[in-house]
Image (spheres, rainbow, N blue to C red):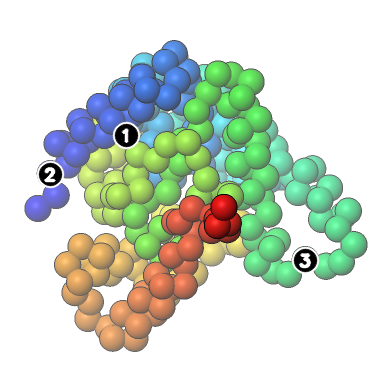
Amino acid sequence: MFQAEKVKNECIAWIRNFFEENGPGCNAVVGISGGKDSSVTAALCVEALGRERVIGVLMPCGEQADIGMAHLLVEHLGIGHYVVNIKDAVEGIKKNIPFALKSQSLTNLPARIRMTTLYAISQSNNGRVANTCNLSEDWVGYSTRYGDAAGDFSPLSHLTVGEVKQIGRLLGLPDVLVDKTPIDGLCGKTDEENLGFTYAELDRYIRSGEIDDPDKKQKIDAMHKRNLFKLQLMPAFVPEL
C-alpha cells in the first residue's frame, strides 16, 4: 500500500533540503503544461519553499488548446509566471537547417527549446529548474533527452503515475488537473496511444512485476532496456595517465 501522506511530506522536506544545500534563497522554476506532473511538482515546491519562491513558465508553441489548464494551475497556487511562446524559435531552427528533419527530430525539438527557455529564465531569476518526469515515463524512456528529461532536481522520478495522482489530491489540486488525460503536447496523441499500453498497466508491472498481456510485457521490457541510457550520465573516456 502506497503511503501517500508520508511520501508527500518526505518529498517536501527533500525539496527544502535540496535548496538549503544547493542554492539557499534560490527559486524553483517549473515548466507548466497544465498536466498532473507539472501541477504536482509546482505544488510540492510551494509547500516546501513558499509561493513567492516558485516561478511557473508556460511555453505554448503557437496555439495551445489546453493552455487554460496551465493558467488554472498558476492561479490556483498563486505563483508568479511567465508566458513564452516558442513557435518562432522552433520555426527559426527548422528554417535554417538545410534539410528536412525527421519526424522524431521535429517532435523532440520543442521539448529541447522549452528546456533552454527554462534555463534562460532560471539563470536570470536566481533559480533551479525542476524536472517533472515521473517513474512510469522514465521507465520506458517516454521523455526527451536534454528536453523534459533535464533539470536540477527531480521530485517525481521515483513515483509512478498513480502515485503522483494520489499526492496531487492530498495537495488539494483541482481534479481537472490531476485527472487530465496525459498528452505530450507535441504530436497530437495521448501518452497511452503513443505507448500502446495504459499507465495503470505499466504502474502495476513496475511495482509488482505482474502484467496480464505478454505482448505488452515484451514491449515494456524492450522499451526499458532500449532507453536506460537516458537515465545515465554521459559516457566519458577516462585515459590511463
Q: Residue 58 carries which label?
A: none
Residue topped by disc 3: 101
Which residue is located at x 42 percent, y 36 percent?
Answer: 153
Residue topped by disc 2: 3
In the picture, measured across the screen, residue 171 lies left or right of residue 46, that is left
Within 10 angstroms of label 1, few (less than 14), some, or many (20 or more) residues? Answer: some
**Residue 129: x and y, percent?**
51, 33
**Residue 130: x and y, percent?**
46, 35
Q: Label 1, secondary structure: give it.
A: loop
Q: What residue type is labelled 2?
A: Gln
**Residue 149: x and y, percent?**
50, 50
Between residues 163 and 178, which one lies in front from this camera angle?
Answer: 163
Q: What residue type is labelled 1?
A: Leu
Q: How far apart are marks 2 and 3 (CA)?
A: 45 Å
Q: Residue 173 carries which label?
A: 1
Which is more foreground, mark 2 or mark 1?
A: 2
Between residues 241 and 19, which one lies in front from this camera angle?
Answer: 241
User: Mark 2 or 3 closer to N-term?
Assistant: 2
Q: Which amino acid does label 3 sit on?
A: Leu
